[in-house]
Structure formats: structure tokens, C-alpha cells
Image: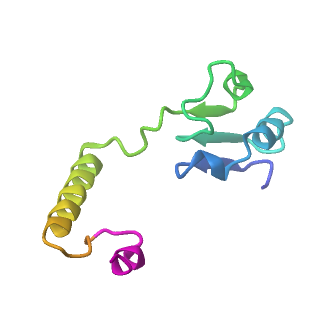
Amino acid sequence: MKPTGVLVNTSRGEVVDQRALYEALRERRIAGAALDVTDPEPISPTDPLLALDNVLVLPHIGSATGATRRRMATMAAQNLLDGLAGRVPTHCVNPEAVEQRP
């Protein structure tokens, strides 16, 4: 990344090597980081990342808008209804596993 780059992680904590990120931020090799997820989660209050002035760590609330939460609830309900009806859930991430069931 460029020295002006900002790393943003909203996916999974394991995607980022936090020790390497800490070093890059401390040495100002990158400008900053914003983390909605960490590894482990929750992040330890003694984690050195939290002492840096160029990092923002959120408590995994990136999806906490009303609209997003309503959509997530609707998708979960639809998957449940599909499963009860014997259908592959509409929002199934691994339909091949459902197709292989006995």
C-alpha cells in the first residue's frame, strides 16, 4: 500500500495480519486503518493497535443500520421457510451441501 493508504476491514478479522498491520501503522508505512472486525474478537483492551492514533476499531457494528438489520432478518426468515418447505434456502451459501444430503 502507499504511505497515504488506509486499510479498511469489514469482512473477517483473520483476513488481516494484525501484528504486521501494527508495525506498518506504527512506522507510518500506511496512513491508517479502520477495523470493524479483529482477530480475536473482541479485541483485547491491551492490544497495541488500540494505543495508536492512526487506527479506528469498531465493535463489529458495520452492519448495524436499521435497513441492514431488517434485510438480514427477512433473509433469515425466508431461509427458514424454505427449509421447512423442503427447498434449498434462497440465501444458501453452499447449495451443493444441501443437494448431497441423504
Is 92 inside the magenta-drawn segment? yes
Q: Where is residue 53 in the image (x, y as percent from the top left)?
A: 70, 26
Q: Dividing the picture into quarters, in which one does residue 22 lie?
A: top right
Range shown magenta: 91-102
Tell me the quarter of the picture where residue 76 sits.
Answer: bottom left
Q: Position of residue 73 (x, y in %)?
A: 22, 51
Q: Answer with left or right where residue 99 lies relative to residue 52.
A: left
In the image, taking residue 28 as reference, residue 100 lies left or right, namely left
Q: Position of residue 81 (x, y in %)?
A: 14, 64
Relative placement, left or right, of 27 versus 63 is right
Quadrant containing the N terminus is bottom right
The residue at the point 48 percent across, 32 percent down is 59
Res 54 → quadrant: top right
Residue 12 in picture, x, y percent from top left = 56, 50
Q: How many marks?
A: 0
Q: In this view, does 47 lie above or below 37?
A: above
Query: Height in image: 11 above or below 93?
Result: above
Is residue 95 shown in magenta?
A: yes
Residue that protrudes farthest toward the right in the picture:
27
Viewer-closest of 55 and 36: 36
Quadrant assignment for the C terminus: bottom left
**In the displayed structure, would residue 54 be above or below residue 69?**
above
Query: Residue drawn 41% across and 72% down?
Result: 94
Of residues 48 and 78, which is closer to you in this image?
A: 78
Q: Residue at x 13, y 71 (%)?
A: 85
